Each structure stands twice: as structure tokens, then as C-alpha cells.
Image (cartoon, rainbow, N blue to C red):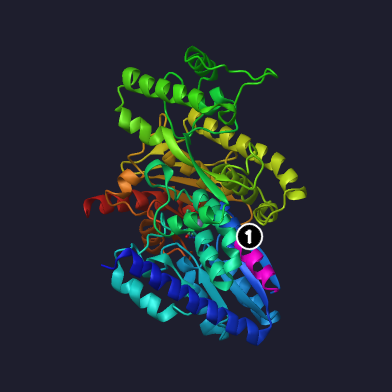
């Protein structure tokens, strides 16, 4: 077992090797650099970090955002490289498809001008425990492939795609240390701040040190509610804290806050936000909620504190009170752009645009939030979640589009869980209009992942069993793929059996 310093040193050395390979090839070919990245907050942050770093080196680049690096996309890329000379960077995906990339680019086209900076489990690897296989992949691909599992880091919590892009950028030029805050936004987008009170773990905590040392980020202990929504709404609609009697009811929550002695309106008659409160008022709310939870709901005070008090990562260069000031709201804004066909706006904002792109994003954010609320309400009111013995599932039908089916599944599993059973994984299926397939998103709570459920492995195994010619995978708690429409029933039944097997084999 390597200690943490050895792991970090080895990782940094490996980044240097990939950077040297990159510089050598880019210098040789004088080719345009084509960055391919994923459409979520982590992917957009990765694209922005790399774009900014290349811009600073005067290297011409172009960014393409994809919903996933699927076989068809890889084929398109392979056709494209024959027409235009280019160097490719895959970030926030690529590891889960590295064999396909090798087949289509190196073997078919003798094209090796690409690198992968990704944190997902590599293709053919089912878990971080497949140490021998992981080492073999590392040895065969270390010149063009950076993946945290090669060094004993867990890619689902210790580093994101944006983090890997950041280490690459910093290796290219120390100046890029100012992109550390964007790397944290990416990690938050992938729900990686999973240490106690939402702290960062592993390589992410090194990025946080960089961001703090360069005066970009402040950490503040705060209540775990939105800092920009009216406070009663923030508490009643908290995605993470469930307080029966208050949750879902803004009027009762308003009365609750008033009885704690909190003045709820500002001088303009608007309901105040968490940002408007002073420390004493926050202290009152915190004690009030702890008392409410322990006396009325019989929850251990330490359990509620763990969730109630969090580290908030504040971006010191942003306007106080704007959603860009709070890294987690920033990340939400990027997700909103990526998942509503406005990825380029998100990248522009992450690269520093505070005018046109930022203004345009406000409406996008509002609509995005509305569509999430509408989707969740529809699922609940119409009781759309169906059960099998070991899994649960839902279809998006005409209400939940494929681009947000994963976000909805995440909110159910990783959110406050009101009325939702977290003891089984969930699969969301939504039709992709342009392709006649279902996009599938699977999510499992940590509690069952610790019991042996691994959705990345499960999705790959099930696709293989059904002979589906598709790529799939991700992380143990969150994975995806796509399947032909007529295979949905068989797919779900196989998932049901596989979950049973995974739990049995533990
Ligand atoms: O698409 P969805 O949000 O459900 O994906 C969950 C996780 O699985 C994401 O991290 C995504 O990048 C990953 N994934 C993957 N390969 C796929 C589909 C999803 O690695 N074919
Ligand atoms: Zn990611």
C-alpha cells in the first residue's frame, strides 16, 4: 500500500509525462487542438480550464461538448482526423472508452495524437480493486492517459475531470494556478465534496489548498441551505435536509423561523436569504433546527449537525450574493447551461465572461430549475416510480427529457430523500428523440454501494449479456448507457438480477 505522498508524487510525475508528450506532438504537427468534453458542470469546467490554459500558451484550440463519448461519436472523430490535422484532448470522458479510442484511432488510422484526462473507471475495469488490470492499462497507456485509479485515488470522490485538467494546466504553466477554483466547481458538480461537512478529499484537497493560497477561495462554515433563495423556501425545499412538518411547506417554515425570533423581511419587504443573516441569527436557526430534529423527530443531534453545518466555498473575486459567489451555485449554473443546449455559454462563464454569457444564463437557470421541480413533482404526484425486487425505475415519458434524466435520478438518490426508498438503486430511462434509443441513468446511494452495488460494472455486464453494441459505465454509484427501445424490459430485468448477485457476492 502506497502512502499518500508517494501516490501524489507518482501522479504528478505521470502528468508531466503526458504534458511532455502533448508538447512534443503539438510542436511537431502545428495542429489545431480539439478538446472534447462532457456536457455537465464537471465537463464544462474541464473544457474552460483547458481552453484558458491553451489560450495562454497561444495554442489554437476548439472545444466540442458531447452528451457522452459514444461509439458513433468516436467514429465521427475518426473520420474527422482524416480531413483536418489535429491533436485531440478527451476530458471528463475517454477512460471508459479508451479501448474503443485505441481501436478507432491508433489501430485503424495509425493516429496517436491524443491524450485522455479522465476520472471514470477505465473500460474493462469493474472496480478500484482490480489492481493488476489497472496496472496493466497504466503501463500500456501512461504516455497519453491520466486516470486517478492508476495511482490508487478514487475517481468518484478524490478528483474530477476538471481537477485532472487543472493538474495538466498547472504542469503546462504555473500561472494556471488561478484556474484552481474552476476545478473545485467541477468537483462539486460531480458531488465529490463528500468528506465530513462537505470537505474535499484526496487530490481535490490539494486543489483547494492552491485556491486558498492564491486568495481565490474562502471557506466558511454555514448552514446547508441555499444562500440566495428566500430563507423559508431554502429550508422547505432543501435537497438534503428533511424536516417532516416543515419540508415542502413554506408557510409553516416561515412561522417556525419567526418563532425563533428571526426577522424575516428586509427593508424592501422581501423575505431575507441566508446571505442576509448575521452570525447570531444563523446560530439561532442552527440551534432551533437541532432542537426541532432531536425533540420532534428523535434524530441524534450529531447526525443532524453533520448535514446541517457545511463548508461553503466562496469565490472571492465574484460579486457577493450572486450565484457565482458560491461555488456550489456556480456549478449548478454550469449544469443548467450544459443540460439545456447552452454548453458554450457555460464554458464562456467558466472562462470569465460576466457580461453577455452570464446575462443570458439567468433565464436558462430559471427554466432549468423549473423543469427539475416539474419533473420531480410529476414523478411523485403520478407515482411514476416502479418497483422490482432489487431495483426501482422510471420512464421520463413526455415530461423528463434525456438530458436531465440523470440529474433527476441523482436528486432522488442523493437528495433529502423525502418519501423515496434509498435501499434500492434507481434507473431513469428517457427517449432520445434523434436516435430511437433510451438514455439510461443509474444511481445508487452510498449505503448500498458499501454493501456491494457497483452500477458501472452492472451496466457493462448487462449490456454484454444482452449483446448490446454500446458503451456504458461510470462510477459505482452513478453510471449510464443507452439501449434500444425494445430492450428496456429485458435490460431492467437483468439489472434486477445483477443487483441481487452483487449483494449476494459480498
Ligand atoms: O449519463 P449519466 O449522468 O447517467 O452518467 C452517470 C455517470 O456515468 C457520469 O459520470 C457519466 O460520465 C458516466 N457515463 C459513462 N459512460 C456512459 C454513460 C455515462 O462513463 N456511456
Ligand atoms: Zn466528471
Q: Residues within 10 Å of mark 1 (few under 14, many from 20)?
A: many
| Residue 279 image position (x, y, % from top left) | 50, 28
**Label 1 sits on residue:** 48
Give left or right: position of 10 versus 161: left
Name which residue lies at 30% across and 65% down: 3
Above-or-below relation of 103 to 253? below
Residue at 64% in and 38% down: 320
Q: Magenta span has 54?
A: yes
Pick the quarter of the image with the N terminus: bottom left
Residue closer to the observer: 367 or 42: 42
Label 1 C-beta lies within 8 Å of the nearest ligand 2 atom: no
Q: Quadrant of residue 138?
A: bottom left
> Seen in the image, is 300 located left or right of residue 234?
left
Q: Which residues are magenta?
A: 49-58
Choose top left, top right, bottom left or bottom right for residue 29.
Answer: bottom right
x, y (%) of residue 443? 42, 47
Q: Left or right of 293: which side holds 273?
A: right
Image quadrant in which you'd find residue 131: bottom left
Specify whether 298 is left or right of 272.
Answer: left
Q: How many marks?
A: 1
Q: Nearer the viewer, residue 177 or 409?
A: 177
Q: Residue at x 52, y 74 (%)?
A: 101
Q: Is residue 418 visible?
A: yes
Amino acid at each position: 500500500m502506497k502512502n499518500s505522498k508517494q501516490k501524489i508524487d507518482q501522479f504528478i510525475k505521470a502528468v508531466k509525462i503526458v504534458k511532455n508528450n502533448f508538447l512534443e506532438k503539438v510542436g511537431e504537427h502545428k495542429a489545431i487542438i480539439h478538446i472534447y468534453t462532457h456536457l455537465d458542470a464537471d465537463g464544462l469546467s474541464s473544457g474552460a480550464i483547458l481552453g484558458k490554459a491553451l489560450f495562454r500558451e497561444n495554442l489554437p484550440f476548439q472545444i466540442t461538448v458531447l452528451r457522452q463519448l459514444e461509439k458513433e461519436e468516436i467514429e465521427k472523430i475518426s473520420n474527422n482526423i482524416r480531413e483536418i490535422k489535429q491533436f485531440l484532448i478527451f476530458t471528463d470522458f475517454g477512460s471508459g472508452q479508451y479501448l474503443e479510442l485505441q481501436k478507432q484511432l491508433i489501430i485503424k488510422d495509425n493516429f496517436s495524437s491524443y491524450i485522455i484526462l479522465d476520472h471514470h473507471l477505465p473500460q474493462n475495469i469493474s472496480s478500484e480493486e482490480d489492481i493488476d488490470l489497472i496496472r496493466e492499462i497504466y503501463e500500456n497507456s501512461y504516455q497519453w492517459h491520466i486516470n486517478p485509479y492508476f495511482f490508487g485515488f478514487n475517481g468518484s470522490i478524490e478528483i474530477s475531470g476538471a481537477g485532472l485538467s487543472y493538474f495538466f494546466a498547472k504542469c503546462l504553466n504555473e500561472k494556471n494556478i488561478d484556474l484552481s477554483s474552476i476545478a473545485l466547481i467541477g468537483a462539486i458538480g460531480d458531488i465529490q465534496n463528500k468528506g465530513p461537512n462537505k470537505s474535499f478529499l484526496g487530490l481535490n484537497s490539494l486543489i483547494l489548498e492552491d485556491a486558498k493560497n492564491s486568495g481565490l477561495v474562502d471557506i466558511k462554515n454555514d448552514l446547508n441551505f441555499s444562500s440566495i433563495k428566500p430563507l423559508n423556501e431554502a429550508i422547505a425545499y432543501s435537497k438534503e435536509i428533511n424536516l417532516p412538518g416543515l419540508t415542502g411547506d413554506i408557510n409553516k417554515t416561515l412561522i417556525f423561523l419567526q418563532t425563533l425570533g428571526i426577522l424575516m423581511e428586509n427593508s424592501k419587504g422581501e423575505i431575507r436569504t441566508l446571505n442576509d443573516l448575521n452570525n447570531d441569527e444563523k446560530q439561532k436557526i442552527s440551534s432551533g433546527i437541532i432542537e426541532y430534529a432531536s425533540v420532534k423527530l428523535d434524530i441524534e443531534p450529531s447526525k443532524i449537525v453533520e448535514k446541517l453545518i457545511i463548508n461553503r466555498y466562496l469565490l472571492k473575486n465574484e460579486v457577493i450574493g450572486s450565484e457565482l459567489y458560491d461555488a456550489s451555485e456556480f456549478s449548478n449554473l454550469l449544469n443548467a447551461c450544459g443540460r439545456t443546449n447552452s454548453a458554450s455559454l457555460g464554458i464562456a462563464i467558466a472562462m470569465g465572461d460576466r457580461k453577455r454569457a452570464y446575462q443570458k444564463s439567468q433565464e436558462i437557470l430559471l427554466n432549468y430549475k423549473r423543469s427539475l421541480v416539474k419533473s420531480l413533482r410529476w414523478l411523485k404526484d403520478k407515482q411514476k416510480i416502479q418497483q422490482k425486487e432489487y431495483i426501482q425505475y422510471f420512464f421520463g415519458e413526455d415530461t423528463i427529457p434525456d438530458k436531465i434524466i440523470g440529474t433527476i435520478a441523482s436528486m432522488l438518490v442523493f437528495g433529502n430523500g423525502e418519501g423515496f426508498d434509498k435501499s434500492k438503486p434507481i434507473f431513469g430511462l428517457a427517449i432520445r428523440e434523434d436516435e430511437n434509443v433510451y438514455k439510461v441513468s443509474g444511481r445508487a446511494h452510498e449505503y448500498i454501494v458499501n454493501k456491494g452495488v457497483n452500477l458501472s460494472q452492472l451496466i457493462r455486464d448487462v449490456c454484454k449479456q444482452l449483446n448490446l453494441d454500446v458503451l456504458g459505465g461510470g462510477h459505482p454509484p452513478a453510471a449510464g448507457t443507452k439501449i434500444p427501445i425494445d430492450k428496456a424490459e429485458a435490460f431492467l430485468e437483468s439489472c434486477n438480477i445483477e443487483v441481487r448477485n452483487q449483494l449476494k457476492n459480498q
